[in-house]
Image: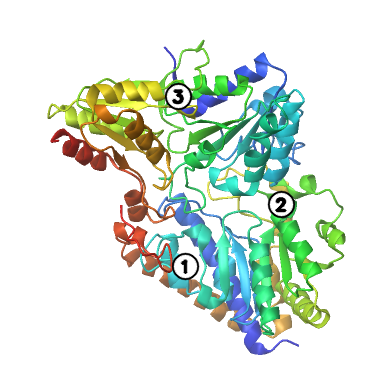
Amino acid sequence: MTIKTVKDAINDALVQSFEEDKNVILMGEDIAGGKGREQYQGTQDAWGGPFGVTQGLYTKFGGERVRDTTIAEAGFFGAAIGAAMTGLRPIVELMYVDFAGVCFDQMMNQAAKVRYMFGGKQKVPMVVRTVVGAGFRAGSEHSQTLYSLYTHIPGLKVVAPYDAYDAKGLLLSSIKDDDPVIFMEHKRLYMTSCEVPHDLKPIPLGKGRIRREGSDVTIIAIQRMNLFAEEAANELEKINISCEIVDPRTYSPLDEELIFQSVKKTGKVIVVDESNPKCSLASEISSLISEKCFSDLKAAVIKITAPHTPVPFSPPMEDFYIPSTKTIIDAVKKLKDV
Amino acid sequence: MIEKEKINWIYKKIFTIRFFEERIKKIAKEKIVPGYLHTCIGSEAICVGVMAALNQDDWISSTYRNHGHAIAKGCELNEITSEIYGRKTGICKGRGGSMHISDFSKGMLGSFGIVAAGPAVVLGAALQEKINKSNKTCVSFFGDGAIHNGAFHEAAGLAKLWDIPMIFVCENNGYAEATATDWHLNTKELSDITKAYDMLSYIGDGNNVFEVYDITKKAINEAKQKNTPIFLEFKNYRFSGQYEGDTQLYQPQEEIDKAKQNDPIKLAKENSSKYGLNKNDLEKIINEAKEEVDKAFDFADTQPWPQPEDALEEVYVNYPVEINR
């Protein structure tokens, strides 16, 4: 039995992919760190990215494949697209998803569209690894999730793993995938751990997961919200309310069937999303359920999201911003009484 | 010849910033405050020297490494500290935190967490000054890492094309995050990049507050006289890591030791008699600065936290629908 943190599971998936395919390369800001000071002992590979996730890759695979960049996302994202079209499998690191704005054109207008608009002759097998999430007291420009921003764009695939098992399995798949994939890592989950078999097979994109079986209420939880959904379910079990937790894991493609099956079973649904509410994954999933499972529903779908504000810095306000276990418990109780 | 009052101001500010940042480093170690902290130890002379050439109502933009700019621009020390502590009385009401210390009423357009976000915003303020035939000076601070970013280049190109007399101030502190500047530059001198825009540029010693002041003052006059943007590169050394908690493995000890010989505070002290300050004057200023910093931290410590629901305020100027949880 091997217990791994999300951070180490991602590193393992990267190492394995580098070993399996010589076309896999990694580009990003300080993904090694210490560039320009290699002559001093101990300065190479000084960072491994701001969270240390890519540590060791530079030493193992060298600077030709593990490339530190300047602070020029539009440049190296564009380069990843060209490299991907011509045979490499680039992984680029967007240090925080909040920096999406400075290189969004590359993903929205080039990576997502070249295959379609140029007659299906080319493919863009690249992965954007990025860090999302509030709860780090990192303020408005380093704390967003922005899941729906990428999910909205046809041509992009979006993955957001909750635990180390899924992180490894889904990253292996994302790197092998022939389409551009946005792989979102939650900063508050990096140090959480679970069992990850050494020989874990890639987990196909578009397959969700039932994290807890139950019969009264379905909770569809997005990434870190699985933690609060689980806490809520444990509490509710004590008063004989049985919750089923569905973790879609990938948002484009979305495992609609898995969601609909659970809705058919319970007829009562809560969607929990850390993002802002407008045009969010919560609203998308809720609308799909209303459209496709109307006759199965015993009550309107409840969405639990952040409010329509930027992420505030100060702890009391940030804690208020993030959906909580208590909000989920209250919503479940409300539905149970229906 | 600099007037006595300004010299005292310069000394007071430069020590205040150093003491403030040393205190921040200490509380970062003790994990007293939430979130990311980026201190500017080694940048004091640039913050103070540039600001000495500005009026309070001139416009600046800063970055996530902003404490020194905010202090030098005249933001209230109590409010800065309270913000870093996440308190309701903070300069941004607890919504911004250390990375976004900024007070519009003191001429700060913003402290942006996105690299190279500032120059274009300052360009816009300078355009406004031009259109309204006002004469406020507009300065954008950014680090050497920002010069590879498209947003910087687009702002530089427009500023030159539109004859906008703004000042680009690049703090070349030796590192872009954990990457050495001498590795990431493609040109011999950083400021050579302005050649593409045929923009005037000057290089100065960013450790010498009086040189920074002098160059900035001249640049502002020249920019306004010639109706042209000017790029200033001040060279210094980032003694702090990228953020507090950074292991700084990539900054070799011998490099730090060498840089310490040109520490801006050390130079300021050495130059004090040249600027008419005797030992007692200097000591008095140092004590005052220390005392003010201590008071600000004591103040912050006693300030109330915001209410959770305060998070919902001021998203818009005007929004006909109530924002709630």
The reply to whether dot 1 and dot 3 touch (C-beta < 8 Å) is no
Residue B263, given in percent of the width and then of the height, sits at: 69, 63
Callout 2: 10 Å neighbours few (<14), some, many (20+)? some
Residue B154, given in percent of the width and then of the height, sits at: 74, 58
Q: Chain of mark 3?
A: A
Q: Chain of mark 2?
A: B
Q: Which residue is mark 2?
A: B149
Residue A33 falls in image quadrant: top right
CA gap between label 1 and label 2 equals 29 Å
Residue B234 showing in the rendered view: no
Q: Secondary structure at mark 1?
A: helix
The reply to whether dot 3 and dot 2 touch (C-beta < 8 Å) is no
Q: Residue A278: give its label.
A: none
Residue B186, given in percent of the width and then of the height, sits at: 83, 48
The quarter of the picture where the C terminus of chain A appears is: top left
The quarter of the picture where the N terminus of chain A appears is: top left
Q: Which residue is mark 3?
A: A164
Q: Nearer the viewer, mark 1 or mark 3?
A: 3
Residue A86 lies, with reference to residue A152, above or below; the image says above
Q: Secondary structure at mark 3?
A: helix
Q: Nearer the viewer, residue B44 or A280?
A: A280
Residue type indicated by callout 2: Asn
Residue type indicated by callout 3: Ala
Q: Which residue is mark 1?
A: B80
Q: Nearer the viewer, mark 3 or mark 2?
A: 2
Residue B65 lies, with reference to residue B211, above or below; the image says above
Q: Secondary structure at mark 2?
A: loop
Residue found at x 41% / y 47%: A276
**On the rendered structure, is A138 left or right of B281?**
left
Q: Chain of mark 1?
A: B
**On the rendered structure, is A186 left or right of A80?**
left
Badges 1 and 2, same chain? yes
